[in-house]
Every structure is written in structure tokens, then in C-alpha cells.
Image (cartoon, rainbow, N blue to C red):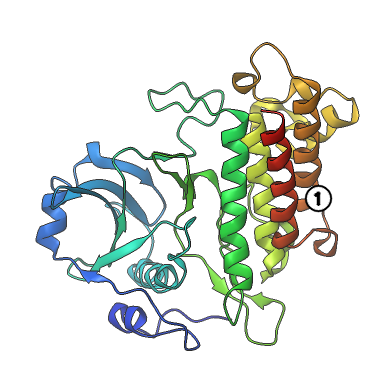
Amino acid sequence: MESRRNSSPQELVIASWNGESNVPLRAFSAEELVKATNNFHSHHILAEDAFYLLYRGCFEKRPILVKKYGKEGSLWPHEDTNSYATHDMAITSQVCNHKNVLKLIGCCLEFQFSALVYECETSIKLLSNGLYEMDRSSDNLTLAWKTRLSIANDIASALVHLHTTFSTPIVHRNLKPGNIILDQNGVAKLLDFSLAIRIPPGESQVEDMVVGTYGFAEPEYVATGIVTVKTDVYAFGMIMLELLTGKRIVDAKRGGSHGHLGNLVKMYMNEDQLNKVVDARMIGEGIGVEQEQQFRAFVQLALRCFEEKREDRPEMKGVAEELSRIWRSVNVHS
């Protein structure tokens, strides 16, 4: 089981994992980040999680994002918050050179818990803000099918990087739309590695405490605490369904077994009525033959990603290859 409680933030940022180099990080002062975020004003909050708040900011006339760990009123023990903050910094510094991972540029060790500073653009969105049909906020995202498919391709590429590039695979373990940033060009970037875990050398799995987000957490992992790369594949399948339908994975209002989006999509697929579950905001007045074929291929791939048995799910490399094939089909017919 991986330990995260024995190293200081400085040691984790400076050290390398298995000899793999880190990106150089700038040391920001607390004063600089307070000024950049207008004293961490609530109007600057982009995202909120159990352990942190993510703020928009401006430093030296350039936009930045600041992840500040340790929320007021949080019931989490300080040692847990510190552990997740330092772990996030260490892993992110390893993986953020990939184009589909949010770029970490610095940190601040002057607060009670570490703060992480990310590269940012003027116009960015959080995928979870406005993706769902019932959310009609001012931040609503009207995403075309091609854009949603591009997002899936981007995140699949990031996961292949995590699973295959390093000497030991990294499992993100908390994939969800709330951890995906869209830049001004619509490029998707993965965020937050506080729950990420490495598979030990020579092993295919690792046991750890159960963490993550309800609905996206793999049932076998929840039941046993055993993590494999297929844990991410399962969650990625959930993201694919949310991208296609604009609905939340779990919604008690749907009632019965349809409370889980996977069951609802399977039902419409079996009844050859996929158009009834595809997000109406991206299909306009109807679905063409080519587009229906693309939707069907996309759903079939998503369903394979969350097969009950891990061995029945594809590896992320295979998922990425199939998404690329669907992408080529879209470009041919667009």
C-alpha cells in the first residue's frame, strides 16, 4: 500500500519517482497568491472539492489557477489534507508535460497546506459546469458532438500517458467532469492527482483505502480496495456516457435501476432508440445516419469500459485507438 505521509512538500517536489525527472516549479509567496486572487475572494472560485478550492487569478498580468488546500470548516484531519496536497504536487509535477494534463508551474509552501499554481488561459471552463441538461447556469456549455468526442479523445490520451509512459503505471482514481478543464480552444486537460496511485514494480494491482467519487468509482475497487489500471477505464466509460447524454451518472429522480445512467443507456440501445438518450442540445432537429453510427460506436465502447469483470474491459490504449477511429469518421462526414 502506498504511503504518502513521510515526506515534506519540498522533498516530494524535488525528489524524482524511480529516477523520472520533475518539471521545475516556481516558488510563489503567500503574498503573491493573495494578491493574485484578491485575497482568495469567493468570486474567483472555479471549482470546489472536499480538500481544496480552485481559484482563478492573475499574476504579472497573466492568468493563473491556484489550488488552495484546506477549506474553512472542513472536517478532514489536517494530516490527511497535507498528505493529499503534497501527493498531488509530486504526481502532477511528473505528468503535466502532457498536452492533456493541466500544467503545474509552481507552488507555495507558506500557507498551512501547500498551494499549487497552474498555467491558465483567459477563457477556460470546467467540464462539469453546464454539461448536464438540468443545469441552466450562466456558465452553460453547449457542446457540439465533435467537441465532446474531442474531449473524450483528449482525456483518453492523458490516461494512456499515465498508464504506459512511466516505469510503474499511474492510476488517476478520481476521473470525473469536475476534474477536467477546457481551455479556450476546447482542449481538455486533466486536473487533480491527489488520489492518484502507482502500481508497484512487477505488479498489476495495489491495495489501498477506498477513495473517489460515487458513481465513477469502480464497484470492484469499492468492494475490495484493489486498484488496477482498469479502475480508470471504468470511470472513463462513465465520463463517455455523461458526454453523450448530458445526464449525471447517478440521479435518484430517474427512479429504479435507471437511476444509474449505464442502465438507462443500455435500455435505449437494446430498444434501438438511442436518439432518446442522446443530449438533445447537440443533435438539433435530428440525427443523420452517419452520426447515429458514430453515437452507437461511442456507446458500445463506453459499455465495454464498464463491463462488470475487469478482464472484459479494454486497456486505455485500445479505447484511445477506437475513439480515434470514430473521430476520423466524424471528420470524413463533417
Quadrant assignment for the N terminus: bottom right
204 versus 334 height, above or below: below
Mark 1 element type: helix
**Residue at coordinates 66% horizontally, 33% vertically from top-left?**
244
Residue receiving disc 1: 304
161 versus 74 height, above or below: below
Percent of width and height locating residue 227: 67, 69
Quadrant assignment for the C terminus: top right
Relative to 42, is 188 on the left or the right? right
**Residue at coordinates 70% horizontally, 47% vertically from top-left?**
323
Amino acid on which disc 1 is placed: Arg
Q: Among all residues in the image, which is located at the extreme top?
A: 285
Q: Nearer the viewer, residue 323 or 192?
A: 323
Q: Among all residues in the image, which is located at the extreme front?
A: 332
Percent of width and height locating residue 156: 62, 54
**Residue at coordinates 43% horizontally, 66% vertically from top-left?**
97
**Residue at coordinates 59% horizontally, 73% vertically from top-left?**
165
